[in-house]
Amino acid sequence: MQSKVMNDYLYKSHPSIFKSHPVGFILCVLLGFLVWGIGFVILFIWWLKVKGILLTIDNRKTILRKGIFSKQTNEVYHSDVRNIQVSQSFFQQIFDVGTLQVSSAGQSNMEISVSGIPDPEKAKKIINNQRNKNQENGNNLNSTNQSTADELQKLADLKEQGIITETEFQQQKKNILG
């Protein structure tokens, strides 16, 4: 039996229909009432497209899934993120939606780009917070490795100077390495 690692989603959202394009939404509704339901058909197709786009952010990566019948998935690990862009028009700022774009060091273009996402600044902050946590964990690991190496070097110097014996050196080395 395989065990699956479950990640808690810190952000999970589909693009918004009304908030990202309020004029288009209102026109579709009006067309639905005025022209034999054509606006409702357009609205339904629009809704299907939006439901086929999902942005999720967990503690390790940002994932963009697109498609209903054919799927495309882009993932960027937070430790690899090099650029996050949020753009919002005047009306998008009023409705708190916008475009979120994420790139990594391995790509020259934006690997994840999604429009109409609710609260894109929140998504950006979550990614930045997770990226900073990853960097802090990496720095702590490096400083631990560096301090261990320093201690071993000092111990080797003491042995070379004849201050401690080979037995004492081996015993202290075991204590340092755990």
Image (cartoon, rainbow, N blue to C red):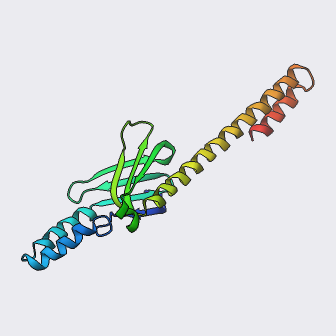
- Report the front residue among 5 and 69: 69
Q: Answer yes or no: is residue 46 visible.
A: yes
Image quarter of residue 151: top right
**Numbered marks: total:** 0
From the image, which quarter does the C terminus lie in? Answer: top right
Left/right placement of residue 41 relative to residue 84 reads left
- Report the front residue among 169 and 78: 78
Residue drawn at 83 percent across, 34 percent down: 171
Left/right placement of residue 110 relative to residue 167 reads left
Rendering coords of residue 74 (x, y %): 35, 48
Q: Looking at the image, which residue sits at the far front?
A: 90
- Report the front residue among 164 and 126: 126
Considering only vertical position in the picture, is 11 above or below 40? above
Rendering coords of residue 156 (x, y %): 82, 25
Residue drawn at 69 percent across, 36 percent down: 145
Q: Looking at the image, which residue sits at the far left?
A: 36
Left/right placement of residue 139 relative to residue 118 reads right
Q: Looking at the image, which residue sits at the far bottom?
A: 33
Q: Looking at the image, which residue sits at the far right?
A: 163
